Amino acid sequence: MDFYKSVLNRASVRNYDTSKPIRKEDYKKLIDAIKLAPTSSNWHSSSAIVIRDKKQLKQIASLSKYTGAIESCDMFVVFLADYNRMNFAMKEYPEFEYNNHSIESYTVGVGDAFIQATMLQDMAINLGYGTCFIGLVRAMTKELIGALNIKGQAFPVIGLTIGSKKEEPEVKPKLNRVFDGVYEIDKLEKDAKEYSDKIEKYYAKLNPDKPAWPYLKATIKSASSYQMQTEEVEKIWDIDLITKK
């Protein structure tokens, strides 16, 4: 498929066709996409754990009622912010000073993880597979660290499921997030309000028997309901990420 068309038609897939596994030649391309992803300053501050074992997928899916896509997918990848390589370098060359417990180091690790995840997602949709990002890995930090044997200064940032689509998913309207030349906060607010009404009408038409919420309400409602394990990440990275009351 043409890559541009793949991008235009991309939508989250949460239920996969388990009778059609990822082709062997495609699996190699997917792994190469992870391995060859860009990394900040060539530090390699992220890692990826690839999971295909059905029993393991079922175990991880059971950790949350919102992660059903994990159980039916053919491939689940957990991307880590991972500073263990940098820490090894610091140990080998102690004459160089570097703060590995800063917001900067945290941002580099998280950024590298998202870059790897996006490279994999792009390769997957270009090969015709369905994907779904799993942000709720951050709500299962402690459980995944135990289940996946994660050690040291590393934690799950984002997950990605991949598999054959049962059907083509509906592509919902998108919100503009691009500014030309300069940032325009007034335009941001205007676009958000317009999109809020547009997406409410879209969901009301798509599922007339279910309540439809505007974007602004749905966004803050979902954010308020997520119980992310930020405290676990603070311990691992030895930084403060949330305001203590």
Image (cartoon, rainbow, N blue to C red):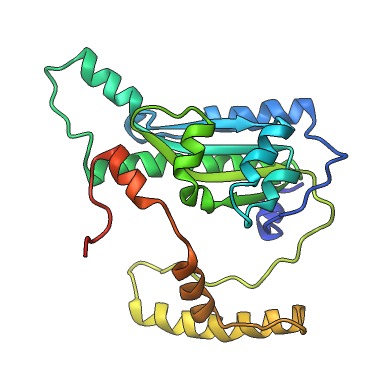
Residue 218 horizontal side relative to residue 130, left or right: left
Residue name at image x 33 percent, y 41 percent: 108
Q: Position of residue 221 (x, y in %)?
A: 49, 75
Residue 122 horizontal side relative to residue 100, left or right: right
Pick whichever, 68 or 103, lies toward us: 68
Query: Looking at the image, is 16 positioned above or below residue 101?
Result: below
Q: Position of residue 134 (x, y in %)?
A: 57, 50
Query: Looking at the image, is 173 positioned above or below residue 124?
Result: below
Pick whichever, 238 or 98, lies toward us: 238
Q: Position of residue 202 (x, y in %)?
A: 69, 80
Which residue is farthest right?
19
Which residue is farthest top?
92
Report the label total.
0
Pick whichever, 44 or 138, lies toward us: 138
Query: Looking at the image, is 161 positioned above or below residue 221?
Result: above
Residue name at image x 49 percent, y 27 percent: 149
Residue 144 horizontal side relative to residue 160, left or right: left
**Residue 208 appears in which quarter of the rendering?**
bottom right
Residue 73 visible in image? yes
Q: Position of residue 142 (x, y in %)?
A: 44, 41
Residue 126 visible in image? no
Residue name at image x 34 percent, y 77 percent: 185
Image quarter (top left, top right, bottom left or bottom right) of the C terminus? bottom left
